[in-house]
Image (cartoon, rainbow, N blue to C red):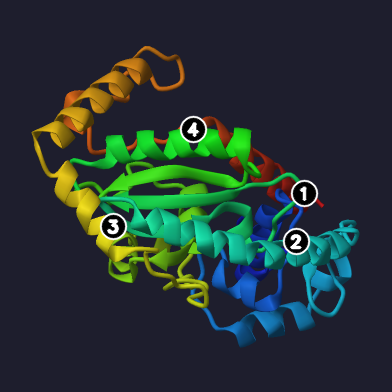
Amino acid sequence: MRATARLNTLECAICSTIAYFDVFDFPVTLLETHRYLHGMRCGPTDILQAVSSGMLIERYLECDGEYFALRGRSALFEVRRVRQDLSQRQWKTARLLGRFLATLPNVRMVAMTGSLAAGNFAPGGDIDFLLITDAGTMWRTRALCRVLARLDDKLGKGLFCPNTFLSAAALRLPRKSLYDAQELSQMIPLFGLVEYEAVRRANAWTEEWLPNAAGPPSRDIACEPLSPGLKRCGEWLLDSAAGQAIENFEASRKIHRFNDTDHLKGAWTRSTRESHSMWDEMRLKIEKAWRDRVDAIASE
């Protein structure tokens, strides 16, 4: 969002940031606005001064003393408080699931992503995770996690959703967008802080979108594997011809299947088997909704 005769560059960045979170019905605090500010490096006091003077509050934003929302969206203040409470109730479950995932063979990092990481957990939501695996083990790890997620859907609470997998051999995301920058900057590492720092370094391009969002938003729920011994035993068993055969079979099966779909046609080849391409439909939908909001503000 470019500066206009009415708003300066910082004010436009603030509106753009709050408009993005509005897509998720999520009003933000001053500190959250600063951390995820679009395209500008500044301090929290700069944000405070910008919203305390000028026409932001008068014309474009609303504030209840704690949260900021777009004008006309004050109903979201109560939505945020309800979802914040729901999020806090899920922290214990998220940490337990994180310890379970950290116990799986060849998993080097577990990070919580999505709505719970943001504190925006809604009724009927699930707990999203991003995993980093050893090179040459991503596909079998993904297959195991998908089986476990289906079991949780049928026999458990349906909260378990490990949905993004990265190989240690390919930490740099091929797609560079605001959506991906937000997801990486918002994720909370539960296990594998060294690997977390590695994936952030590999995707330093996120600083172009969110220059203030360095480091994890929280380290309060870091966890360790339920059984390090069991993890080492599993890795020893899979560090074999049988383990490699499983990986080769699953990689070939999924690569072939993805190549035959309309959404990911041509995205998968044997030369990119370590990469986990990302489905674009959700990103496009979210970014369009954000741009529509920004355009509406600019036209006022």
Tag 1 residue: 123
Q: Residue at x 66, y 44 (%)?
A: 157
Disc 3 target residue:
230
Residue type at mark 2?
Leu
Name the kind of residue labelled 1 in the image: Pro
> In front here: 210 or 8?
210
From this viewpoint, which residue is outermost toward the left? 241
At label 4, which amino acid type do we have? Answer: Asp
Query: Residue 67, image x and y in percent?
Result: 78, 72
Residue at the disc numbered 4: 280
- State the CA–CA distance, disc 1 to disc 3: 35 Å
Query: In the image, which is nearer the foreground, mark 4 or mark 1?
Result: 1
Marks 2/3: CA–CA distance: 33 Å
- Residue 27 visible in the picture: no
* Amino acid type assigned to the residue bearing label 3 in the image: Leu
Q: Earlier in the sequence, mark 1 or mark 3?
A: 1
Q: Quadrant of residue 78?
A: bottom right
Q: Earlier in the sequence, mark 3 or mark 4?
A: 3
Residues marked 2 and 1 touching at CB (< 8 Å): yes
Q: In the displayed structure, does residue 55 sit left or right of residue 163?
A: right
In whole angstroms, how far apart are the C-alphas of marks 4 and 1?
Answer: 25 Å
Work out whether residue 10 or residue 182 is closer to the camera in this orientation and state it: 182
N-term mark: 2 or 1 = 2
Report the residue marked by disc 2: 86
Cα separation, mark 3 vs mark 4, equals: 37 Å
Mark 3 Cα-neighbour bin, 10 Å: few <14, some 14–19, many ≥20 = some
Quarter holding the N terminus? Answer: bottom right
Spot occupied by residue 153 in the image (x, y as percentages of width and height): 61, 36
Q: Are marks 2 and 3 in contact (CB under 8 Å)?
A: no
Which tag, 2 or 4, sits closer to the chain's start?
2
Could you tell me which secondary element the residue under label 1 belongs to? Answer: loop
Q: From this viewpoint, which residue is outermost toward the top? A: 260
